Structure formats: C-alpha cells, structure tokens
Image (spheres, helix red, strand yellow):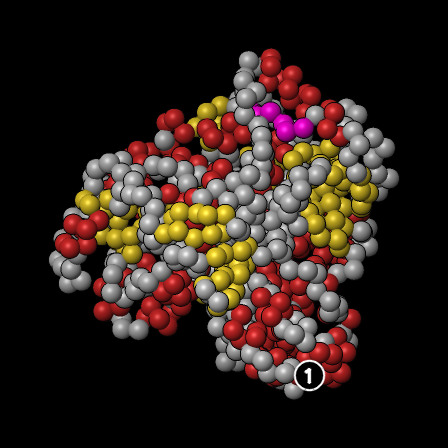
Amino acid sequence: MSNGIPLAEALARYRIDADLGSLPELTDIDTLLNTYHPDHLRDSVVKLAVGANAGDSCQRELAGLLQAEAFIDEADLAGTPVTDIDVLVIGGGGAGCAAALAAAENGARVLLATKLRLGDSNTVMAEGGIQAAIEPDDSIQRHIQDTLRGGHHAGDPALVSALAGDGPEVLHWLISQGMQFDQTPSGDLHTRRAGGMSTPRLVHCRDYTGLEMMRVLREAVIQHRSIEVWEQSPAVELLSNEVGQKCVGAVLTSLIDGQLRIVRTRSVILATGGLGRLHLNGFPTSNHLGATGDGLVLAYRIGARLCELDSFQYHPTGLLHPSHLAGKLVTEGVRAAGALLVNGLGHRFIDELQPRDVVCAAILRECREGRGVRVDEQHAGVWLDTPRLERANPGILEQQFTSLMTRTHVAGIDPRREPLLVHPTLHYQNGGAVIDVNGATTVPGLYAVGEVAGGIHGRNRLMGNALLEIISFGRRAGVAATTDRDRGPKKVTLEHVNNLRRALTLAGLPMTQRAPQVLPAYAAGGVWNR
Amino acid sequence: MTTSNATATESGQPPDVALTINGLAVNAHTGMSLVEAAWHGGVPQVTSVGCLEGVCGSCRVMLRRGKEVTVGLACQTFVEDGIEVVFMPPASAPQHHYKISDFKDGWDIHARFHKIFPEASRCRHCHGCDKACPKGITVENGVALAAAGRYREAGEAFFECVMCELCDAACPELIAPAHVGLFSRRVTAHFHLRPPNLIHRLEELRQERMETCRDEDSKK
C-alpha cells in the first residue's frame, strides 16, 4: 500500500471549514463488503483439513495455528511437578475471575492461572458498558431479539436466552461484589442506547465500565481464601485421559523461569479471551497484549468443536497515529456525536453511522484506491474530523470523551485542533468454542467462557453484550464445573496431541509451526524460545 | 502492511535517542513509548505489559534521570536521551484481608475498616503516594477520607485508579492506599447502591419463576 496522499501534504490541505463535497450515494453494500471487508478477502479464508471442524471455513492465519504442532510431548512431562486442584481456570480477565469466584463460592478449591498479570485483559479496556434489560419498557425478550438480529441470526437462541435472562441478576451480583454504576438523580441505574438496541439498555460507569468491573473482580479474587492465583503462567497444552477424549488438566509454563507445571483437575475452564494480537490479515488491533488465541488452539487440539472461525469484528476507527496508540479505539460515540470521516483529498466518502462492517470496508476502499492519508510506505488512513465537531459543539470532547482526551494528551496531540488519523482495527472474535448454556464445550471436563467461546454473538456482536457474557457464562461455568461428580483423573496423558499429529501427517500438512502463540513475536524478546 | 503495532515510527531513519532499559543500552526513535523502545531494542523478559493504553496498570517502571528517581507506566512514558528505565516486578500479594460477603450491614463498617487497615490512620503525610500515582490521584487525601469513615468521597477520589499499586510500594507505613481506595468504592456500592429500576425487574423475574414452578407443580 504505497499510494495515497502524503501526511504532510494532507495536513497542509486540511481546513476546518473546508467544503467536504456531497456524500456519494451508497448503492451496493454487498459489493462494498465483498470487495473490501477483511472477512471477505478471497485468500483470507481456507478450509480446515483436520480436527472437529475439518471442512469448515477458517481465517488463514488462525487455521495455521489450529493445525500446528504442540510444544511438548510425553518426555517433557517426566519429572514435572504436579498440582492437584478441583477446578483450573485459565485466564485472568473478567470471565476467568467470574468463573473462579462462582466455583469457589460453590466450595471448590480453585487455581486461576493467567499468562500475564491478574486483570490484564480486554475487559479492563471496555469503555461502553454492559447490557441488561432493566428499564420498564424493556424486556428480556427484546434483549434476545436485538442480540439475535445484531448477529445476523447466526447466534444460538438457547445461549442468547440464557445471556439476556441473566442480565438483571448479573448486575445484582456485580453490585454485591462492590461495583459502582452511574445513577439517575432518582437513583435508577442510568441506561444508554447504543447500536443495534431497540431501547436504552446499556448500563455503565462513566467511560470506565470495564476498568471498574475488573478492579472489583480482581480484588474479590485476590481476597478469596479458596482461590490460588498463578501469574505469568501461560497454558501450553491441555491434558487428556488415556483415550484422549476427556480434559483432565493442563500443562502450564512460566514466563519467568520457563519451568513446566502439570495441573491435574476435575474440570478446566478456558477464559483466555480473543486473538487480536495475531494481527489477522496484517491488521492492527485494539486488543490487550495477551490476546493471541491460545484457548482456541488448546481447545481444538483436544477435540473441541469451534464455530464462526471466519468472522471477526473490525472496528472502523482505530488510531493510526501516534504509533504507541496504533490500533487503539476511538469510541463509536465520537461519530455518533457528529464527527465526520474525511479522505486525503478532503472529501466525505461514507455515511459515518452505517454498521461497523460497512464503514470499515469504505475506509479500506479509500486507502486502497489511493485516496487515503499516507504515513509511510505501509500505513495509510483517513481523517476523523474532530476539530470540526469541536467547533460545532464547543467543549464536547473535553466533557464527553475524557478518556480519548487523556490518551492523546500524553502524546502531545490535541484532537480539538488537529484531526485524528484512523484505520480499521481488529477488535473482536465473533465465534469460538461451541458451548452449551453451562459453558461446557463438546469435550467432557472442558468449559469455555468469554471471547474464547462462540455461538452467542453470531457474526456480529452488539456493544455491551461482551461484558454481560463474561459474567453470565463465567458464573454458569464456575457452578457447573464444581457439580461435576467425577472423582478426578487417575492418569493424565497427551494422547490427544498424538491423535492430532497422526491426523496432520495423514493430511500431509507440515508440522513446522508450533502453537499456541503465547506472545506476539515483537513482544516475545527472549521469553519464548522455540 | 506489517503485522506489528510497534513499527509505525520506524520509517527508515536511524534511531536518535539512546537510553537504557533493564540495564541494556537501547537506541530508539523520538516519540516511542518505553514499551515500544523495549520491544524495538529486543530487551528480554519484558512481560509486565498489558493494555498499552494506560488503564491496566501492569507496565510499572522506575525511571532515573540523573539523580532524580521517579516511577510511572511504561506505555504512557516516552523515550528520552540518557534516561534509565527498570521494569518493576509484579507487586507482592496484598497483606490486608477481608471478604465483602462477611459484612452483615453497614453499621460496624468503621470498626471493620480500621481492623483491616490499621495503618490507614498512621499516615505521616510524606506525599510519597501522591508523587507515585501515574494518574494524578490525590491519594493521601483519599486515605484520610477513608480513615475518617467518608467512604463515598474516598472512593470518588480513587475513581481513575488503575491498580498499578505504585502508591502501595511508595508508602513507608504500608497503608496499601490502592486497596484502601478500592475498599472504599466497594463498600459504597455494596451497602448503598439500591437502584429501583433493577430491583423492580429482579422482583418481576422472581415472580415469573415462582409462577412457572407452580404451573409445573399443578401439572404433576
């Protein structure tokens, strides 16, 4: 992508009061999406050759990881220290903490292992809020309908009913844990309406809902006597029984000393989050550093069925500049408040409030056809015209978008004076492991909750349903995992890894790549030697 | 397009800033954050990095400029010539224990607070916590408010807290201000947040469930 208007030239040309031209008519949305949306790029999707989803479409880079060689084999397990525990939770974000707390409240001894620090997650960055049908003119049924429609009717109605039905009780539980929410003067929880909602349903704590949720859950987990927390301890493999068909534990490593540890357990709850840091199709991401899709790889290798592996949400307005914030979000609220998108020629090119996938495709079209603003040989974007918004509504950025102002201020940028350079950014994995209403995967003993699980959001997630999902399904899985009456494993093996190796060999696939990724290559300096 | 978020500033020009990170010499570009510089320079073992936008509190660093030593968050601090940077190890486990579900009602909360955080009333006003906070929170004042039993106001003072626990490390009395702040926020919600719209909907759902149970019983 070497064409486009150079940054300096575009900046010199930028005028706050310029005539932006008339908005070209959007005639053929399907062609726009099929030509420019990353999900629809022809070489972006391949068919899986082995495993529970053999024959299904899957994003190319993800397919490489799902059909990759494991890091360890039986020889590595000899002499490895063993820990026995009732429930192992892998992942220290909102879903993992909710699952650990629910399991511990039900009397289980819980080990929560997390790759980085407890609370390092995408949860902490969620700004918008959490959906729950609590307003008088709203209902659980409307929440279900909105969620299914938003997901293009690809979601599982049973899971969506469970999600929406849990909404009010989830808020009750969060408040009892000590989470604060914004209130109206009369004391009601304040609700907002966001994209895809037929009525106001988004409950929030200013623009820091995820941070407030995460710090409360983190503290609750740390304080709980029955939960042990291992930080800097990524999972590199699950363990199966003699026939490779039930999950009976996991192998963890340590980012500090590289020591492997075996954890034997009755049930494992995967809460590893998404995969933005795989930078699918070369895209920047809004995600946290640990989001490398490890849970999908581990689940697939032990035989779990996955779904919607070719559907990802790209948020239209990720920052392109300054570089340390590359891929980080400018909330949709800025466009909702009236900020326009302008290309390098100084023209509008799309109705800014079209659905996320349409706006995303339009921005990519401008960049690819040479009307973007070029930063260097590889990066181009378009303007998000914040100065014009500020001029029309003096004070709006400071009052309503404090988080954005704080972040750009650190970099010496003032969105009130200069427009922001944006480019679509990889935001959310719509699919994941197939689960039932208890978060159970198709493999006995293995649960998946949060972004790593699929089936709820169909092919497009609505704002505010992710924070609800992590608590609702986190708690469901935590309870279900403790009611498992199995006495626990006698023998732990890597039989499932051997099975996959056989399948890979039979399919003639190379076994040069190893997975899970654990850390993005650029951040792995010396930590992860493979 | 490259896959790394960290390469946007590397447009072929030679690095123009020299600094040290964890004792290693690193050459970086103006405008890079300390996290980008660590990755760019291949500094090993930098795993205390999380959100990269200043809300997760993981990337705690100690900074030395000449004789001046400060602390901060590496993703929110930019490279400077000659600065020495050390990524700090994760904070140790908290020493103050409580379980919010053990609290019966709010009437004994003041006694409980001082039992859980006995050090909070011994603040010596050294301003160490205020100086350490990367979010500019008036930590010392927040602790004083909590010690005086004004939990709502104390919690509000800590609204922007990202749990980096740098104030805990700075406190010579081991007060653990970050946890005092979170305690204040949590008890405020736990005892006082009683929203009518939510309570009404919960009651509706409870009655619906009871009706369903009755219907099922009558069928038997």
Residue B136 in picture, x, y percent from top left: 48, 72
> Is A71 part of what is drawn in magenta?
yes
Residue drawn at x 30%, y 73% as measured from the top left: A395
Residue A254 in picture, x, y percent from top left: 66, 42
Report whether A157 appears left or right of A237: left
Report whether A241 appears left or right of B1: right
Report whether A33 appears left or right of B107: left
Of all chains, the one bearing label 1 is B
Q: Circle 1: is it few (<14), some (14-19), or many (20+) Cα within 10 Å?
A: some
Q: Is residue B125 above or below residue A364?
A: below
Please say whether residue A62 is visible from this viewpoint: yes
Q: Is residue A197 above or below residue A159?
A: below
The residue beneath circle 1 is B121
Q: Nearer the viewer, residue A493 or B91?
A: B91
Residue A418 in picture, x, y percent from top left: 25, 61
Residue drawn at x 34%, y 36% as measured from the top left: B1
Please say whether residue A325 is visible from this viewpoint: no
Q: Is residue A222 above or below residue A51?
A: below
> Is B73 part of what is drawn in magenta?
no
Residue drawn at x 56%, y 52% as measured from the top left: B48
Q: Which residues are magenta?
A: A66-72
Q: Amino acid at mark 1?
A: Ser
**Dominant secondary structure (helix, strand or loop) of the stretch shown in magenta:** loop
